[in-house]
Amino acid sequence: GNSDLDCSIVSGESAPKAVSAGTHVQAGTLNLTGPLTMQATAAAKDSFLAEMVRLMEAAEGGRSRYRRIADRVSALYAPVVHLAAFATFLGWMVASGDWHRAMTIAIA
């Protein structure tokens, strides 16, 4: 049969793709308009969609190293910034005696 397919999940293309008899259709596309009779030419584990899942899992596994580095940096960043702000407040409080000015500068 003839139909239009939504391939956005597979290719990112938002415009429907017209297909007819003999057209190769990838797993994960959505049939929009007409009935289709299809024949599977690959096992589910060999499909394009399964390959995308494998690639996403591999990407998530590799990202964990960077996530650990970011966690370490963020664990240090917040206390250092707060201590610097507190030291700035104390310094300006001692220097000027004006708590409003010291607080404004510490927050900035």
Image (cartoon, grey):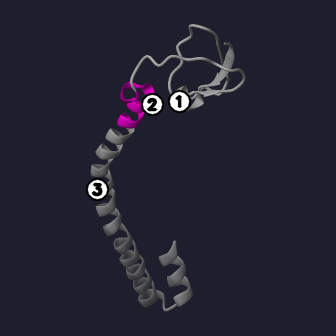
Q: Which mark is residue 95?
A: none
The relative height of residue 40 versus residue 68 in the rendered view (above or below) is above
Task: Say which residue label 2 marks.
Answer: 49
Say whether marks 2 and 1 touch (CB < 8 Å): yes
Residue count near mark 1 (Cα–Cα under 10 Å), binned few <14, some 14–19, many ≥20: some
Residue count near mark 3 (Cα–Cα under 10 Å), binned few <14, some 14–19, many ≥20: few
Circle 2: residue type:
Leu
Question: Element at badge 2?
Answer: helix
Of the two numbered discs 2 and 3 in the rendering, the one whose residue sits closer to the viewer: 2
Q: Which residues are magenta?
A: 44-55
Q: Return the x and y of residue 71 as percentages of the image width and height.
A: 32, 61
Q: Is residue 49 magenta?
A: yes
Q: Return the x and y of residue 41 as percentages of the image width and height.
A: 43, 16
Residue at point 41% right, 25% down? Answer: 47
Q: Is residue 38 magenta?
A: no
The relative height of residue 1 versus residue 75 in the rendered view (above or below) is above
Of the two numbered discs 1 and 3 in the rendering, the one whose residue sits closer to the viewer: 1
Q: Which mark is residue 69?
A: 3
